[in-house]
Image (tube, rainbow, N blue to C red):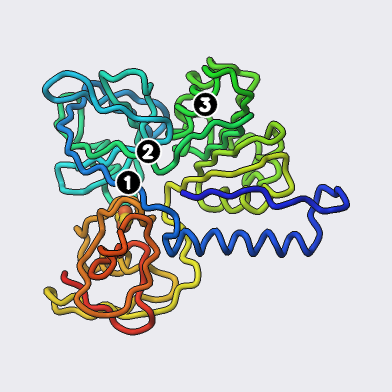
Amino acid sequence: MGTEWVTPPDLRGRQRADRMFRTLGGLITFYDWLTAAFAHRPPIRRVDRDLNLVVDEVRVEAQDVRSLRLVAAGGGEVPSWQPGSHLDVLLPSGRCRQYSLCGDPADRSSYRIAVRRIADGGGGSRELHDSIGTGSALTGRGPRNAFPYVDAPGYLFIAGGIGITPILPMVKHAAAAGAPWQLVYTGRSRTSMPFLDELTALDAARVRIRPYDEYGFPATGAELLEYAPAGATVYCCAPPTMIANVRRDRPASAAAALHFERFTTPPIVGGAPFEIELRRSKRVLTVPADRSALDVIRSTAPNVAYSCQQGFCGTCRTRVIAGEVEHRDRVLTDRERTDTMTICVSRGRGGRIVLDR
Ligand code: FES
């Protein structure tokens, strides 16, 4: 998750900012990363209640994408949520994965999540597709919101593939409120893109469907931002390259602010190699500059718990016995950071970190 505000346009009124402002934009982006990385932003509020849920309905929404309707196991209402919220889902295997809620927040009788099956992923989506069906019991945790929808004079929503899931309730909310909005939705092909009918039923003229097999790939940030209403807030949930393109081109667009959410691991910025000692396993591993501690530990312990891989859910938190940690998460408090780290994003400061693992 991230947020950016507009960099001032060129003083001469040109569409493309001059060198000084491009440099300023770069500094702002770097500052944004620093503030996020070192958690000057308030931590995401943890919601640790466990919810006993049952799969009430499974629907095929697109190629390799199915949606699950989840209801409370004992009947009754599920806890409330807002557009942008996600649910931690604890699978029977012990895996924990996060899924954006893509149903109707006003419908307290159920949650809806949608999952794309990733054949070579970490196994969570395969488990949900291959082993979970109507009647299956699941444990949910949350919901919580790390991608909040804010009131704005207008909206441009940009979704890449399964990134449509947090965007869908936002689009519906904007449409119901009568706010000016546009949606640009990209994907491999129409058959792989879920919820097309649901979206076009809202207002087909505001929905731009851009499958790569029709429009080519990749769309530039400028192409995606072309539809932004003046002063719009942009919500983007997409693969890292698309988010990077939108972040780069947004200052020259009509948009005033950008909120983005990744559904894959973000690139490691400013990483340096370090060592981790797994005290209980009696192993020492080297973490290269371009990999995370979680990634390296998973290569020897595939069942290590993780979920968001972005430092906001806390699933991968691990006790630190010794060593100096550069904390890059958005979930731990200062007190927790004295003896704990999130191994998905936080790193050692060059030396060795000893972990209780
Ligand atoms: S997996 Fe979510 S904080 Fe590490």
Q: Which mark is on residue 29? A: none
- The three-letter amino acid code for the residue at tag 2 is Arg
Q: Secondary structure at mark 3?
A: helix
**Which badge, 3 or 1, is on the more N-terminal residue?**
1
Which residue appears at 26% of the width and 70% of the height? 338
Which residue, given by chain and number where applicable, does mark 1 sit on?
Answer: 45
Q: CA distance from mark 1 to mark 2?
A: 27 Å
| Residue 173, placed above or below residue 49 | above
Q: Quadrant of the C terminus?
A: bottom left
Instruction: Give left or right: position of 173 versus 25.
Output: left
| Residue 174, placed above or below residue 128 | above
Q: Secondary structure at mark 2?
A: strand
**Which badge, 1 or 2, is on the more N-terminal residue?**
1
Which residue, given by chain and number where applicable, does mark 2 sit on?
Answer: 116
All told, the count of numbered labels is 3
Q: Which tag is nearer the camera, tag 3 or tag 1?
A: 1
Q: Which tag is nearer the camera, tag 1 or tag 2?
A: 1
Point out residue 234 in the picture as x, y percentages from the top left corner. 59, 39
Which residue, given by chain and number where applicable, does mark 3 sit on?
Answer: 171
Instruction: Give left or right: position of 322 versus 4.
Output: left
Q: Is ligand 1 within 8 Å of the beta carbon of the residue shown at mark 2?
A: no
**Which badge, 3 or 2, is on the more N-terminal residue?**
2
Q: Residues within 10 Å of mark 3 (few under 14, many from 20)?
A: many
Which image quadrant is residue 23 in? bottom right
Point out residue 225 in the picture as x, y percentages from the top left corner. 67, 40
